[in-house]
Image (tube, helix red, strand yellow):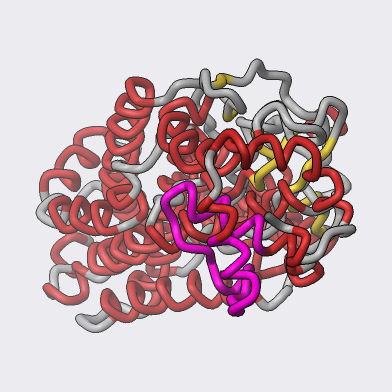
């Protein structure tokens, strides 16, 4: 490829004045929307991959516009007299367009990862989603340029951009409906929030997406030199045919591997690519508060510790030290995030600990409704035996849970703790007791309340 020609095409490239538009699309994507959220390396890497929903179609449209320039401007006959054949000029023009898109993406990655390095409290950069995003821009540029070269005209650029957006979105929708081939869309994130935090990064889906996208790009670029009007010689056309075949083979491998993928509790597994070492949990030392019943979180969530402690500890504090009450509140590292439920707060282990679903802290903000729900779920878990769900709580258990939530400064979530006059009156009686008398009563009767042996009339 002619370096001076690439530099010339870079200066004349339509993507250069569109860089502010790329920046705006980036800012409106999860990349810009999550900057104020807790800094998790896998989440930030996923934001970079998700940003291609806007960056990819614009890159495809710009590439199609550049490919059709000679026909639109009527300069084909004039350029035919130059020393560079048409296929060399096409490769230089496509290379300049792709380089601008990838340089912009690299700068965005460097900026986000530099910010994350300052904000994050645990972990290291996760590169697989970034690689998928880069390959997406490569494929969008190549396919868009091939479309513009094959069907030159002033409408091909918007059609390429809109078509790219629809294809990416349709793939994501197909994945949501359960199609294994929809996972080839780069809008289906290659990793989850747990990868790189609670578990090693599982690259299965990322490798499949990279194979497919790289194959598309290679096949599209190779196809540029196949038509007679490309001006390529026999050797160049043979090389282009070989490149196209390799690209089709790579894309086919990606499609075939996607067809073998299946879901498991950790995410997506591709049997031919799976590494058993990515199934085990990552060892970590939690960070804990200093309350009577401390809240302990993964060190990656250190910035959320004060807020989470203020949310949960007031509910458990009145029962601290009583029989069967947890010694601490932790994130549940056993249940996959996708299987979590807001009401699924469990008491487990010896000594007992209260485990809250860890997905609740993945960027969740403590809105009043969120605080009510989580506090109510914790209160019910504290006063019911392990394994019992909220609808199965006895009236006495509901009354005690209602008092715990009210004592913490919230109103109960009525979807978890329905209100009725008798339980409300019993909760008010508990609230009217002096702290000393209430603690003494709970010390002697909490075990019976949790076992379901007491009724509302047995409450003081």
Q: Quadrant of residue 401?
A: bottom right
Give left or right: position of 47 versus 69. right
In the image, residue 124 lies at what x, y percent?
51, 22
Vertical order, 8 against 338 (above or below)? above
Is residue 88 visible in this depiction of the protein?
no
Q: Which residues are magenta?
A: 399-428
Give left or right: position of 291 versus 28. right
Residue pictured at 20% horizontal, 34% vertical = 4
Tell whether position 423 is magenta.
yes
Vertical order, 70 against 372 (above or below)? below
Pick whichever, 417 or 191, lies toward us.
Answer: 417
In the image, residue 292 lies at what x, y percent?
58, 23
Residue pictured at 52% horizontal, 44% vertical = 361
Residue pictured at 64% horizontal, 51% vertical = 379
Tell whether position 375 is magenta.
no
Give left or right: position of 194 versus 155. right
Marks counted in the figure total 0
Vertical order, 179 against 125 (above or below)? below
């Amino acid at each position: 490829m002619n370096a001076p020609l690439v530099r010339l095409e870079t200066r004349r490239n339509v993507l250069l004045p569109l860089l502010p538009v790329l920046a705006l699309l980036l800012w409106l994507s999860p990349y810009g929307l999550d900057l104020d959220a807790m800094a998790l390396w896998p989440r930030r890497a996923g934001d970079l991959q998700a940003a291609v929903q806007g960056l990819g179609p614009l890159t495809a449209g710009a590439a199609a516009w550049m490919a059709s320039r000679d026909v639109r401007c009527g300069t084909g006959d004039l350029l035919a007299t130059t020393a560079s054949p048409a296929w060399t000029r096409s490769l230089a023009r496509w290379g300049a367009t792709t380089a601008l898109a990838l340089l912009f993406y690299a700068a965005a990655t460097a900026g986000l990862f530099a910010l994350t390095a300052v904000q994050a409290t645990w972990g290291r950069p996760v590169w697989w989603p970034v690689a998928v995003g880069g390959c997406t821009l490569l494929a969008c540029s190549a396919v868009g340029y091939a479309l513009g070269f094959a069907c030159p005209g002033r409408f091909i650029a918007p059609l390429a951009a809109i078509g790219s957006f629809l294809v990416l979105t349709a793939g994501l929708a197909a994945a949501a409906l359960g199609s294994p081939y929809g996972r080839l869309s780069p809008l289906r994130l290659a990793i989850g929030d747990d990868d790189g935090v609670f578990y090693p990064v599982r690259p299965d889906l990322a490798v499949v997406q990279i194979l497919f996208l790289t194959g598309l790009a290679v096949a599209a670029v190779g196809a540029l030199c196949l038509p007679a009007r490309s001006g390529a010689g026999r050797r160049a056309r043979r090389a282009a045919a070989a490149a196209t075949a390799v690209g089709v083979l790579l894309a086919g491998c990606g499609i075939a591997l996607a067809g073998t993928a299946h879901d498991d509790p950790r995410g997506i597994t591709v049997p031919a690519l799976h590494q058993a070492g990515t199934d085990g949990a990552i060892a970590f030392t939690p960070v804990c508060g200093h309350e009577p019943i401390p809240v302990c979180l993964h060190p990656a969530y250190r910035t959320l510790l004060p807020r989470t402690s203020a949310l949960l500890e007031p509910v458990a504090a009145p029962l601290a030290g009583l029989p069967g009450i947890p010694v601490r509140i932790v994130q549940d590292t056993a249940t996959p995030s996708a299987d979590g439920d807001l009401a699924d707060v469990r008491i487990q282990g010896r000594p007992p600990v209260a485990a809250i679903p860890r997905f609740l802290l993945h960027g969740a903000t403590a809105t009043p409704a969120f605080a009510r729900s989580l506090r109510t779920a914790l209160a019910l878990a504290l006063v019911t035996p392990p394994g019992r769900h909220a609808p199965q709580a006895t009236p006495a258990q509901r009354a005690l849970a209602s008092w715990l939530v009210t004592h913490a400064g919230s109103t109960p979530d009525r979807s978890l703790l329905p209100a009725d006059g008798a339980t409300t009156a019993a909760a008010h009686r508990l609230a009217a007791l002096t702290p000393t008398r209430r603690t003494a009563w709970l010390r002697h009767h909490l075990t019976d309340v949790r076992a379901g042996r007491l009724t509302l009339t047995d409450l003081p």
